[in-house]
Amino acid sequence: MVAAWARERRDRPLGHVSRCRIVTLAASGAALLALTALGLVSQWHDKLDDFLVVAGLQGVIYLAAVSAAWNGSSSRRIMLVIGAVAALARVAIMFAPPYLSSDIYRYVWDGRVEAAGINPYAYAPSDPRLEPLRDSDIFPQIGSPYAPTIYPPVAEAIFLAVTRVSESVTTMKAAMVACEIAVFVLLVRLLAVEGLPTARVIVYAWHPLPLWEFAGSGHIDAALIAFCVAALWAARRGRDGHTGLFLAGAALTKLYPIILLPALYRRWGWKMPAAFAAAVGVAYLPFISVGSRVLGFLPGYAAQEGFDANGAGFYLLGLLRHLPPLAALNAGVYAIGALTTLAVLGAALVFAHATPRLPFGAAAVLATAFIVLVSPHYPWYFAWLIVFACFVRSFALLWLTNACLLLYLIPGYVFVQSDYRFAIETIIYGPFAALALVDIWYHRRHATRSSQPCLSA
């Protein structure tokens, strides 16, 4: 009876409430587009503080739009407004020069190196053997030219494919926006399959973080997110082999999505892990000629970011060290504790559910735990969490994925222990912890209500 009433309500003609919702979303979308223009002006004049103020205002309007769309009907007009605003904002930013990060120049360089038949893990851009490939547009903008690439094989394949179209940052950014289009379509399909309002795609589509990091800076994480959503789609449909392949695609773009394996694993199944392992092995074969150097600069990069014996890059470790009994806590001990925590969480999720029919909550828990324990230093690493917020109501995730832009306030991205860095990260993670408790209370209360017997009239 309740299901029939819900279907009837969804099928009703567009009414007054829906018109109000469209007006609210249209006004929010117009404000977001206006602020996007202001953000571009701030970038043009190289005023980072002004840009962050604009991004903060975008976050406030974004939250209002999410609130309006979360539980409402998903008419064609609403979806058109959501898609149009997301597209217009991205097109405007896509043609602007990269501002927040120079990583995209490395992407173009790696594609050029591969096209020349050279293993990108073998030589750093500054190596004299690569001098014939240097130019005045891409090479001078490369960060850490003394280091070989850190990107896994699927990322390198994407760099090669895109640069065969054009060796330009605009083309690379367009490729990342194309990945976002795939994310949009898959999210709408998944929301529909789950019986949730498809308008919840606004949680991703209008979020300021992917807007500036993917359309603006062209980070490869957009492809990672597309692979992750495809893996969620395959897991939801019980296609274990495809799940393993898509998850491998995500992990071979950047390594950290491997943390989702327990969330997508079907207990006692073999197809998913087998497909994952096979894909990883095949992807690395073309580059195996460099032997142990196939990880490129990744170990050096981890040390550079403070994820070494000193442990200066871990926020939670720094927080624990502020407690007198733990002032001398070893980074190795912290790393073992973090890995143990993730392993216990993963095992609990595997044995709590025999199949990954509803993988969204489990994936959200593992991904969020990983991000908090590692505390990445760059905002784009937080962007994949937005996907899970489309399915799981979480004030904590919405805060974390918006507040992480404050990381740009840390000058020079030099991650050593400092009171200033610790204060900025506390502003990010402190409210997140409080809101996470609110989320837990909300979901427990909702589960308790759902488990109570209903009286039919």
Image (spheres, rainbow, N blue to C red):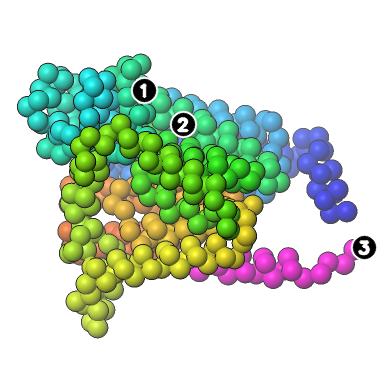
Element type at marker 1? helix
Around disc 1, counting alpha carbons within 10 Å, would you say few (fewer than 14), some (14 to 19), or many (20 or more)? some
Mark 3 or 1: in front is 1
Amino acid of disc 3: Ala
Element type at marker 3? loop
Cα–Cα gap, marks 2 and 3: 48 Å
Around disc 2, counting alpha carbons within 10 Å, would you say few (fewer than 14), some (14 to 19), or many (20 or more)? many
Q: Is residue 410 left or right of 428 when viewed as pictured?
A: left
State whether residue 101 is above or below residue 277. Answer: above
Mark 2 or 3: in front is 2
Mark 3 lies on residue: 457
Viewer-side residue, 220 vs 289:
289
Q: Position of residue 349 (x, y in %)?
A: 54, 63
Mark 1 lies on residue: 161
Mark 2 lies on residue: 179
Q: Is residue 177 left or right of 126 when viewed as pictured?
A: right
Q: Residue at x 14, y 34 (%)?
A: 124
- Report the span colored magenta: 434-457
